[in-house]
Image (spheres, grey):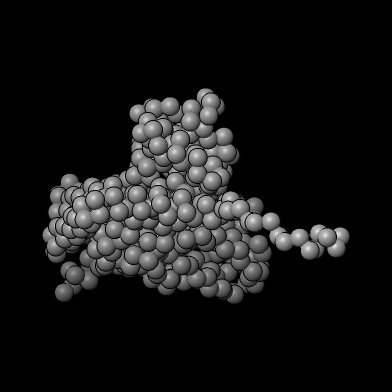
Amino acid sequence: MRSLARLALACALPLALVTTPAARAAGTESAIVAGGVVVALDQHDLAAGPGEKITFASTVRNTGERPLDGYVAHLNILSPDKSVYVDPEDWSPRRTQFLDRLGPGASTTLHWDVRAVTSGAILLFVSVTSPAARTVSSSGPLNMTVGGHRVVNAGGVLPLVLWMPAGVLALLGATSVRRRRHR
Amino acid sequence: MAERTAVADPPTLATPPTATRSAVAVAEQELRDLWLSGRGVAMMLAFTVLMSVITYLVASNQELNFLEQREAVSLTLQVAVAVGGLLVVLVAADAVSGERERGTLESLLLTPSPRRSIIVGKGVAAVSLWLGAFALAVPYIWWIGRDVGTFGTAVAGGLLVGTLLALALTGVGLLVTTFSQSNGLSLALSFVVLLALYAPHQMPAEATRGWAGELVQRLDPFSAGLLYLERLIVNDHSLTQDAALLVVPALCAVVLPALALLAGGRLSLSPRGGS
């Protein structure tokens, strides 16, 4: 039990050293905090099917002492898997939002609509930057797994592929009979 | 003046039919020739056999079955539109040069129908093949996309794009056939045009990047129309989201039949203008 506690302490110490209090406030350890702007997402893992629409929220908090004016939030969409092609425009047509003035200690919530297009592992995160782009703060990642690579179910294909030509063939026979009768 | 009123009306001669009435009469006759003679139905048989083979492969062949269901719907619909266009070209390219070769154009020109009405009637018959092919493609599209909710948009988009392309190809076929002495030349030329329009869509994805690639995709009515369908079905775009891609197909659907109609006014026994 004591060795377990020692191990936990050994792991926690380096983490405490690299993680800023502001990043901890962002609710996820891997957030990047700059200029007193903290961005946090309301979800961190998500599974969706192809074509499914999902909505998630990001909270932007001003932890600094000066008001934030003219800041811009942007949704980034990419795949860590190089075989998965991602065109962000297909996933979300509205990926940039302009923030209202945010006083010290104040926060605002932004909602993002995304439609899962391609199957595979997808990474989403929100970055917030100042008008002069001197600082960029980013949220932690939202790991999205788009599963259910749906393929056509072959069951019941034979009646369709046989009966359709057979029906047209019968129609052709009928027109041929009609033509002979009219001669 | 009094005398004039007293005179009985002169006996009325058979009034020449109006252009619209003539066009309807020619269209009725052409439709009857196409569908009741069995020619149109035979083409539909070939079309359904092709659609059945593609549907069967999409559903059961391991090489094609890796396709995501939406991609399979898109592929099938694109084949239906392309082959429907081919059928339209076959009939339109035969419209005048075929009559010339069979020696039946003279009797057609001797009817009181205006020459442009003849072209309109033949154009209607050609477009009817696309509508027949599309009606037969609907069950296949429904079956392939039955679980992914794309049926409605696929049918609406397919009908829109296919009709625009069918009208454009009818214009091409009628233009070529009006100026062709032989049916073989007319068919060959029309096919070359069809292939040239279809070729940019078959280029590898890398070739369509950059401003030149994008320009070709937007200026070629076939590529633009098929790209519209792909985005509509695979990327789940709305019907209006990529409407800009339909500008060129819509222009071609208006301009090419209009040109064919203009050329049809000079329709004569010989393509060089001799009557």
Residue A7, by quadrant, is: bottom left
Total number of numbered discs in the rendering: 0
Quadrant in which the N terminus of chain A is drawn: bottom left
Up-down relation of residue A162 to residue A112 (above or below): above
Residue at image coords 53%, 73%: A109
| Residue closest to the eye, B11 or A40 | B11
Residue A59: where, in percent of width, then height? 50, 71
| Residue B55 seen in the current view | no
Left or right for B235, reference B270? left
Going 31% across and 61% down the picture, which residue do you hit?
Answer: B138
Return the residue nearer the eye: B203 or A33.
B203
Name which residue lies at 47% across and 61% down: B239
Q: Residue furthest right?
A: B1
Q: Nearer the viewer, residue A106 or A52?
A: A52
Tell me if A83 is positioned left or right of A107 in this view.
left
- Across and down, in percent, residue B2 comes to 85, 63
Tell me which corner region of the image, top left, top right, bottom left or bottom right, holds residue A146: bottom left
Measured as percent of width and height from the top left, residue B75 is found at: 30, 50
Q: Residue at x 53, y 47 (%)?
A: B113
Q: Is residue A71 among what the camera can see?
A: yes
Image coords of residue B269 (percent x, y): 48, 31
Establish if B77 lies above or below A45. above
